[in-house]
Amino acid sequence: MMTITLLPYTFSLMVTFPDVPLGIFLFCMCVIAIGSVQSYLLMVTVIFLPHISKATTWCKDKFMGHRESPAHNVEPFSIDLHAPLSKERVEAFSDGVYAIVATLLILDICEDNVPDPKDVQQKFSGSLVAALGAYGPQFLAYFGSFATVGLLWFAHHSLFLHVRKATQTMGLFNILSLAFVGGLPLAYQQTSAFARQPRDELERVRVSCAIIFFASIFQFAIWTTALLHQRETLQPAVQFGGQEHAFMFAKLALYPCASLLAFAATCLLSRFSTAIFHLMQIAVPFAFLLLRLLVRLALAGLQVLWDLWPERPQQDQGEPETQSQLLPASC
């Protein structure tokens, strides 16, 4: 999707600079990337992924022993006529807001970052590559902002996959989250102006961190509200003590913690506010990719500390050992 949204920008370059092959080259690269992802990689995934999954399962059973999978991890879909809100309507409205926000981001790129042909000739000696290089901070801000929108949507989508019934309080927190998601184009405009107005970069970084924090913390509030009535609102896998509970908690807490940490770091290291903000935009997507592994390592470390805790009360030999309710049954 990120590559598709760049197609209008390559069209603008082709129209503005018809004699320079760079615009055509960028357009072709975007088309090749889109075609590769949609066809070849998808085909390879469909063909080889089942075999890889079977091989992985065989190796796991060989070295760790066969384990019975839970019989009912996900309950079948059912319509609850007594639900205060329609979960499908909440998801549809949220998806529409995220789509509009992503569209607004690319519209700013297409409108403001096509260089003027006269400036290319006078300032950059006719080099379109050098002219586009001057817009490097704006492109970095765009990709970081688009990644933020995409990951917030992914966290929202993952949460509502496990929601069985949406309450009015959850709907209110969802509206508040979407209100700040709608401010992400403003955060992009703030961060893209770092190079043009470096004097105000500290305030711009803090405004951007605040927008991202509130957009994500209200998502976390939806999750917290659902946990208060988890038997009615959530699937068993993500309830307290479920297999996916810790992973969902970490997924929804990542952006609030990262944005709050970046905001606090700018208070101590104001000179490096721009670098801190861009580092957060780069680090969070990588953390999302490695999040399940990080959660497993953290749970394993907590389990080791629990086993080695010297003052843990000894249980009676006649009673079976109960597992800690803070840790899920399996990572």
Image (tube, grey):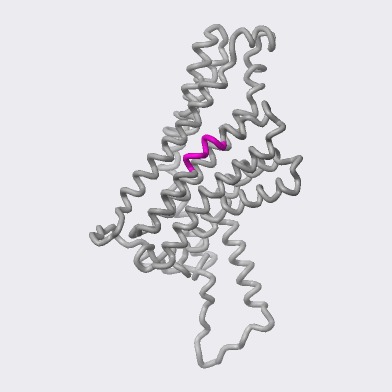
Residue 107 at x, y = what percent? Answer: 48, 26
Q: On screen, 137 above or below 57? A: above
Q: Is residue 302 left or right of residue 93?
A: right
Q: Quarter-wise, where is residue 194 in the image?
A: top right
Q: Is residue 82 visible?
A: yes
| Residue 240 lies in the magenta-colored region | no
Q: Is residue 189 left or right of residue 228?
A: right
Which residue occupies 49% across, 56% down? 220
Q: Is residue 51 visible?
A: no
Q: On screen, 313 above or below 330? A: below
The majority secondary structure of the magenta stretch comes to helix
Which residue occupies 59% across, 15% down? 115
Which residue occupies 35% across, 44% down? 93
Q: Is residue 51 left or right of residue 288?
A: left
> What span is in magenta?
181-187
Residue 323 at x, y = what percent? Answer: 52, 77
Which residue occupies 42% across, 35% down? 100
